[in-house]
Amino acid sequence: MTATDTAAAPLRHYAGLLAIELDPQHADPTGKPPAPLTVAAAAALANHLAKDLDRILDGISHMGLIMPGALYDQTEILRPGLPLLQALAELYGNRSHRAEFTPDLMALGADQGFFPVPAINPLRRPGSGPLLLLPFCFLGPDPDIARLARVMEDTLLQNGEVSPATGAAVRQAFGLTALNVSFATVGDLCALLRTQLDANGFLPLWELLEHTWFERSGVRSVVLDAGNRYLVAEDHAHTLFYTFNDWAQFGPGRALPPAELSEGYAEWTRAHRQYSMALEAYGLHVRQVLANPGLEEALTTADGAAALAAFREIPCLSGDYLVERIFHNDSENPERQVLMTHQATPELGTLAYTITTLDADGRLARLEHHYPLRSQGLQTIIDQWVQRCADQGAERRVLHPGRLLYSENGRSLRAATDADPPAAAERVH
């Protein structure tokens, strides 16, 4: 609950949600959510919803109420500071210029297909189902909102099923086949997500997200079973990125026996991708820094504030991919042969490319590992080396062993050799 300034006096707001559970038998899992409603359609739907809320909450005529005629997925609602809900409350306050508070029902429509206020425009991302949400905000004096909030949290989820007329109006307005249409609070949505994440082993992710949604003070940090470390403060998440060599030599995999390094690094990479993607989906800025032994040691002993300071001292990784240079011959002799070893697992796909190049005399010119940092990074790596070989007239060979290749003694990635049975091989001139 936050304050909203009006010309008369500060108002308070409290948000709720209309939750629409789509029928998976009739919903396109890759389809986009429907476009926002027109002004007329939004007003008609808002009247239906307001009547139901008046019945369920034992009277809301003394409260201001604002509703957009649009649907959002939960990652658009649950973002650091809940900005969409704040924007709705501010829109109501900005249009309330009376000397005394007079409750209104404000319905927001979009005759051009989008709202003139970017903060409330739905993203309409493909695959947003199966739960779509229509948010709304009550506004009024502090005591009234406090009482309403208690009633909503105590009863809205249990008694929040919409009337048959409202359910039909929602389905018709948005053209959806819905299994269930009911009201809930933001707290109810959070509790549902927490249960889902906990059931799937992602409770630490919930702890990070909840800290930012409600703008908790200080730093929240978690260390996963795979050794991944995340710190969140405000709307930023900080984490370490390990190359295989770093992970195996001084990082979370340093104590594992050599035979377990491949499986261990794959587990770390899986968690890194899952958590980073989820945090970004919920609106956090994920800041990756390259791990080093000093930082690794500092983070094991520092408290939250000191750990955050240690992270911020190191420039974050930028660009689509990371190059780990192991050897580079400073000779000006051009590279004539390029061997690319595709370091991958069947489940995760590409983890890195090991690049070795030879000059015309067959001497090693370069040994590097290229790690994609973003989804587009893999194609960027491939395109760069295709172009480089074309420019230099070098032969390019790509080997796909179908697994991570590494030296057990050196605990470091290595290039494929003829002794390694490949899953596939490609030769391009």
Image: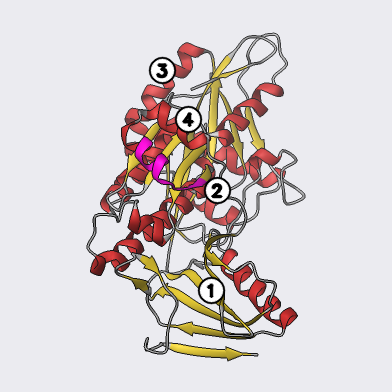
Q: Is residue 367 left or right of residue 304?
A: right
The residue labelled by disc 2 is 72
Viewer-side label of 3, 1: 1
Q: CA distance from mark 4 to mark 1?
A: 35 Å
Q: Along the line of sight, which residue is nearer the eye, 50 or 183? A: 183
Q: Secondary structure at mark 4?
A: helix
User: What separation in Å lies between label 3 and label 4 (alpha carbons)?
Assistant: 42 Å
Q: Report if the CB atoms under discs 3 and 4 are less than 8 Å apart.
A: no
Q: Magenta residues, as a range? A: 288-298
Q: Which mark is residue 147?
A: 3
- Which kind of residue does numbered mark 4 sit on? Ala
**Is 138 situated left or right of 386 in this image?**
left
Amino acid marked by disc 1: Ile
Could you tell me which secondary element the residue under label 2 belongs to?
Answer: loop
In the figure, 332 relative to 241: above or below?
A: below
Q: CA distance from mark 3 to mark 1?
A: 65 Å
Q: Which residue is mark 4?
A: 309
